[in-house]
Amino acid sequence: MSTTLLSLPIEILQDIHLLSTSEHLPISCKRLYEIYTRTTTARYRAEYLWRKYALKDQQWTEDEEQRRNDDNSIGRTTERRRKIRWDAILACPACSIEVLSILRHFHSERLHSSDQRTVPKLKLPGLPTRLFKALSSEPSTGSNSKDLLNQLDQAYRYIQLLLTDYGASPDKLGGYPLARSVLSGNVPFIRLLLNHGARPGIKDDLVIMVAIETGDLSLLRLLIEPGFIHPLESSLPFKDATNPVNPLLLHQNSSPKIQSNKKIKLDDRVQITDQMLEKAIRRKDPKMAQYFIEKGARPTLETIRLLESL
């Protein structure tokens, strides 16, 4: 009787997958997909990602550096640096919070030295776009709504972890994370990104233009004014950023407690432009138009005529 791939024990199939580091093997058939999604542990997935995106690239880096060392003068030493594709690792759905914690341990082991001060802190690039996928889904009733709520909660916690513990930049990908959050109107996500330095003014004020399209003046003010509190944030008492959040129902927020007895005037996050005013007028939104005028935008003759017709 001939032996087929599907007839092999699960342990051997997992070894084959780890050795091949193939992303195509688990999706080659339904049976293999079930095996690799239901029988693998977080440790296994971390090892797979490490083999695929760290060990292989490390071999290339060592070979390339050896060539460079041969070209250098004798006696000159070059410190070897690992080239780990963290952006590719984070983009994989298999890289959960638990898996990332294990990968962080792998990274520390590889850089271990007698002096721990020489081990650089792990700093990851931008936020993966997959974490914002749930923002494009529409909530419904029943189990689908509950599943969406869980997805949003997990995505929020993951984003918060990357921003606080790994120094990820919220402005990578041209400000996509903030723009996507504004487009969906998700206040907790917006507040989280703003609190960690997201800039609404990058890419020619793209995020502000998206906010104008939503027609939500409170959302627009949240992006522009550092001290502004969105009505959905003030509906309940403030809680610390580390507390759980309900991103779907918007019952909680991620901002720290704000002292009400002292108010400090802060500069706006963006410079108000005439183009913002023109866009608000063309949307026939008099409240936004008036807001931009009060902020210093200067209407042209054409925008004045449009404003008078509102």
Image (cartoon, rainbow, N blue to C red):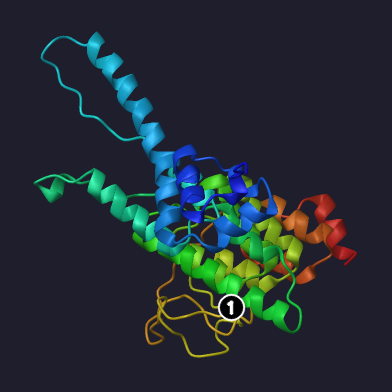
Give residue 72's quadrant in the image.
top left
Residue under the point 62% across and 45% down: 204
Front residue of 55/184: it is: 55
In which quadrant is the C terminus drawn? Answer: bottom right
In the image shown, does 273 or 97 lie closer to the viewer?
97
- For the question of whether residue 235 can be seen, the reply is yes
Residue 166 visible from this viewpoint:
no
How far from the left and from the top, in percent, is residue 285?
A: 80, 67
* Residue for badge 1: 230
Residue 263 is drawn in which quadrant? bottom left
Q: What residue do we see at 58% from left, 89% from top?
A: 235
Q: Nearer the viewer, residue 128 or 14?
A: 14
Secondary structure of the residue carrying tag 1 is loop
Kindly indicate the quadrant of the structure image that contains residue 60: top left
**Which residue extends farthest right?**
309
Q: Position of residue 230 (x, y in %)?
A: 58, 78
